[in-house]
Amino acid sequence: MIHRIVTLLMAACLGYAARVSALQFNENVETLEITASGVRVLPLPEYVPVDVSLATAPAGTRAQVEIDRGPEPERVRVRAKVPQDGVPLRETIAVADPARHFAWALRRVLAMEGIDVSASTPRAANRSPQPESLSLLWTHRSPPLAEILKPMLKVSQNLYAETVARVLGDSSFAAGKRAVEETLTTMGIEPGTYVYADGSGLSRYNLVSAGALTRLLVFMSRHPSFSAFYDALPVAGVDGTLARRLGARGNVHAKTGSIANVRSLSGYVRAADGERLAFSMIANNFLGGSDAADRLQDSALVALAAFSRGSTSEKSSPSR
């Protein structure tokens, strides 16, 4: 079995927290495929310049890879020692300019279709002059929100969350934030009881209570679109970020949340008598490992799944 050690100097992963743009391609990341024979960039081989220092290690040894940003915005440096018989190592790189990345992909596809693009060079968005006039060439309708929610919630695709927040505000996060805050007010979650700093939840300025999240969950359980929301949540022991957590397979639909020293889990669990319960658990600033926080939350859900009020009738609206 080939082991691997990957040290990333800029962050835990250079593909983490990709930038947001109105034009996005491949979730604003490129993938580095590293083997003993070299480094490939996918899916746009020419987009990310790579400075490579590569050595071959004996078969069966551990791969060692260091990746950091180069002096130019899209350039990266790869220093690696890879076993000759090792499987390819893949690491994602968030692009610095998503709009230019999109334009580069569009230019490549047009060229593949036989369209002459030799006079076109994608430029950085902040240096591109505003055209005097624009003509609509094509309109594309996205999948419905119910489909967009699934990767956003099941695998915590933060880019989607940030993008949806801006869509709500017609490309402005400030306007999208106001739309979110107005909606929360209709749920009984008043301004001043939380801080909403970004769409993805990665900001340390975000503040919310377990009580507020539970009120949101109860509100959504009575909403006409509840089934789409419920189906988009990770399912314990089945998929998403809960695929390998909890023994109650299929009985918990919930969203995980994690950054350093924070572990949260909020969603729904079926009690022993069929009642659907809404719950939210947040562990902050703990000193132990995250696994201990996960085990404690999982234990609480096992207890909730065994809970019964003594009624044999199924209840559709969650209790808190």
Image (cartoon, rainbow, N blue to C red):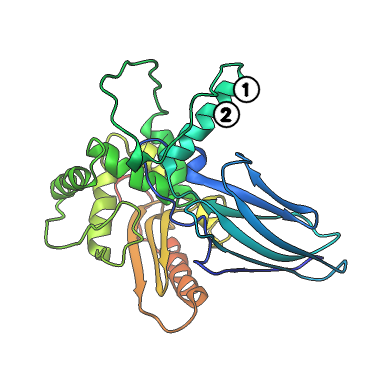
User: What residue appears at the point 28 percent right and 37 percent down from the top-left corner?
Assistant: 167
Q: Which residue, as the protein is rendered here, is positioned at the far bottom?
A: 287
Position of 159 with respect to 29 (left or right) is: left
Q: Nearer the viewer, residue 33 or 213?
A: 33
State the count of labels: 2
Residue 101 horizontal/vertical position (percent): 48, 39
Residue 5, by quadrant, is bottom right
Q: Which mark is residue 108?
A: 2
Position of 57 with respect to 269 (left or right) is: right
Q: Nearer the viewer, residue 22 or 255?
A: 22
Residue 191 horizontal/vertical position (percent): 12, 57
User: What residue appears at the point 28 percent right and 55 percent down from the top-left corner?
Assistant: 198
Position of 281 with respect to 232 (left or right) is: left
Residue 55 horizontal/vertical position (percent): 78, 65
Residue 111 horizontal/vertical position (percent): 59, 22
Q: Residues within 10 Å of mark 2 (few under 14, many from 20)?
A: some
Q: Is residue 286 above or below residue 152?
A: below
Q: Which residue, as the protein is rendered here, is positioned at the far front?
A: 119
Residue 262, by quadrant, is bottom left
The reply to whether residue 314 is visible in this rendering is no
Amino acid of disc 2: Arg
Q: Is residue 108 above or below residue 45?
A: above
The reply to whether residue 140 is visible in this rendering is yes
Q: Residues within 10 Å of mark 1 (few under 14, many from 20)?
A: few
Q: Secondary structure at mark 2?
A: helix
Amino acid of disc 1: Met
Task: Confirm or deny contact between disc 1 and disc 2 (CB under 8 A).
Answer: yes
User: What residue appears at the point 54 percent right and 69 percent down from the top-left corner?
Assistant: 9
Q: Secondary structure at mark 1?
A: helix
- Between the C-alphas of marks 1 and 2, the distance is 6 Å
Q: Which mark is residue 112?
A: 1
